[in-house]
Amino acid sequence: MRICGLVGATALTLILSSGAFAQEASLDLVEPIAEYKIYVSEQVAKLVEDTTAFTAAVKAGEVDKAKALFAPTRVSYEAIEPIAELFSDLDVSIDSRADDYEKAEADPEFPGFHRIEYGLWEKNSTEGLAPVADKLLADVKALEGRIASLTFPPEKVVGGAAVLMEEVAATKISGEEDRYSHTDLWDFRGNFDGARKIVELVRPLIAAKEADFLKTVDANFNTVDTTLVKYEDGEGYVAYDKLSEDDRKVLAAAVNTLAEDLSTLRGKLGLD
Amino acid sequence: MLDPKDLRRPSLSLDRRRLLKGLGATAIGGSFAGVAKAETLHHSVADAPVANATNQIDSVPCLGVHQAGIVNARPANGMVASFDVLAKDAGELETLFRDLTARIAFLTVGGPVPVLDPKLPPADSGLLGPMVRPDNLTITVSLGASLFDERPWLAPLKPKHLQRMTRFSNDALDAEICHGDLTVQICANTQDTTIHALRDIIKASSRQMILKWKQEGNVPVITPGPDGRAESARNFLGFRDGTANPNSSDATEMDRVVWVGPEDGEPVWAVGGSYQVVRIIRNFVERWDRTPFGEQERIIGRTKMSGAPLDRRDGHEFDVPDYAADPEGKATPLDAHIRLANARDEASKAHTILRRPFNYSNGVTRSGQLDQGLLFICYQANLERGFITVQRKLNGEPLEEYLKPVGGGYFYTLPGIRDASDYLGSSLIAAARGA
């Protein structure tokens, strides 16, 4: 997920200066947000562990091993993408795409997972990737270091579920994120789990009043699950180009509808 | 929509009289005040162009035996958006049709936009402000062959001639802008109104369908001449287009040319519908502009400036060429576009189609050329006898050097929404449930 650095920085400043729980309506959210923070911490710990192994393989020139570790390593990062806006500088450095750089893949600034993905799949080589791997590991460790002291504004967390669905609808369903490795379905797993986690955490707060809404949201998450299950392969998923056109349509409609529905979640919780 | 500089045009006096007549209505009175001031006040670049209030409140009824947006005159802006439909059974398809009907009913009539809790996303995009005005909007829904072919419960109900568009000899079809399960043709006076309608429909139907492609276009707005007679609009080749169209205000002629009737051997549910052809036809305009004037006229078969046929160059665009008197094509070449498309004899009457095209201008190609052309749309009661036959006659025409059809498809336009208790496609759903 990329957002404009300036906007991200401004948002962050606002969050830091306004405190986490500015809204009265969010008192009930203290517990869900605390739980979400634990979830994020667990995911990031796993990310650091997996990235350590992944970058070690890259640095050791073990192309096949690095390829095998690429997609599973990313799942925990994709799961915390709903709040990537809160660490936008690291998000750029960890997960930006070639399109974000003027010279695309040839741009020396092109960093992170996708820079390594490009080398592994397009060049079948780890040549020149050691410094990229070092920087990636440093960045995920920096992220881990930040989480403990990072403020989680409820509106950003709750809104993040919808934002991530927007991101999937706009620039992931096309298969452009993992364009070299075609491991997009692994990312989807992380994205949907991460978004659903947020819905689960606030469910008790709206269960009585918004039963129909939750039923629709659940149905769409379930549609995604049953579709993804069809493409499981071992511990993970088959390549994105194996996804049938019919199933791509089913996923696209589910994602658009989740984006549409989850865009109301903040308001339903009284968050502005 | 009037540009401020157009206010100086003599035609304004007519518009102003029309406005004055409508001054009784407060809404119009308010807008009129804006028009009057426009002549005396300086305009800032940030000001919106001054609208013609009578256009904004113009509306086309969405109820009737046939859908709107076919025989009524084209407004300045048009669009075709094609969708993939997810419906797995008749119930889900009915929900989609009912939802579309509800949006059409609101958008083509207009009204205030619902106001929601500001903590929630707004109900409306707000493009048209707090009050949606009809602005001559029509929304016309048609179905593609794939909708039927991919659903065994619907397949037996497919209209007889409905098929997936296949390539003609000069086509270079791009799969990304071809076909679809359902098209929505949206036409209105202003582009904001067509875009507002599209965004409204996408928002309302995200559960049921996914946007596949869209193409927008427009028709140049032409002031009628001093004799009050309107001229045909020009396409991006600079020629008048649509001159030989059948008279769309002649109901008997439309029954013959456009509307599927009980005698056509189509499924009963389809009566009142029509076959829609959409073709995105790129024009190589740079090359065209480098072609000698006389050759351009011979390729099209009309004089460029007036649109008069080549065998009566001093005539009028609506004069009918006399091909019988020109068997060797000395005045109008035998392979001229208009002569191939319509030989003007008894036999060609069977192949009449109602054309309703819009010009499009998209951007720049990789080669640094303009991506412009014609969003060709036509309607006919028989697809095979209509467009397909006419296009076969055009295969190999000299104009092909300057054209490249790249997208579109064949669709079946649903019968109309009969009354307020009906919904779009109700006859198809009833037939699907009965089958």
Image (cartoon, coloured by chain):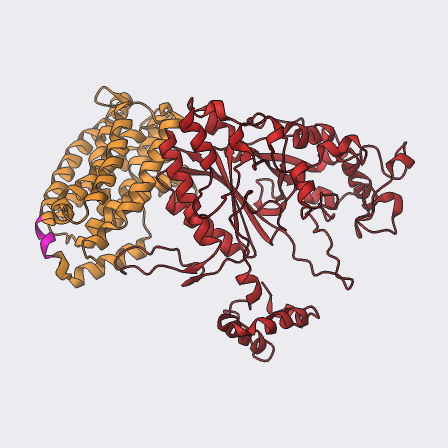
Tell whether B275 sits left or right of A168: right
Q: Residue at x 40, y 39 (%)?
A: B96
Tell whether A258 sits left or right of B411: left
Question: As rendered, which of B105 and A201 lies closer to the eye?
Answer: B105
Task: Tell me the quarter of the image containing the C terminus of chain B.
Answer: top left
- What main secondary structure does the magenta stretch of the protein show? helix
Q: Chain A shown in which color?
A: orange
Q: Position of residue A2 (x, y in %)?
A: 32, 46
Question: As rendered, which of A61 and B207 lies closer to the eye?
Answer: B207
Tell whether B126 sits left or right of B44: left
- Quadrant location of residue A254? top left
Image height of A235 relative to B237, above or below: above
- Region of the chain picked out in magenta, as a range: A27-31
Tell me if I can see residue B208 in this picture: yes
Q: Position of residue B369 (x, y in %)?
A: 62, 43
Tell whether A24 sits left or right of B118: left
Image height of B157 relative to B259, above or below: above
Image height of B280 relative to A228, above or below: below
Question: As rendered, which of A212 and B10 lies closer to the eye?
Answer: A212
Q: Which chain is red?
A: B
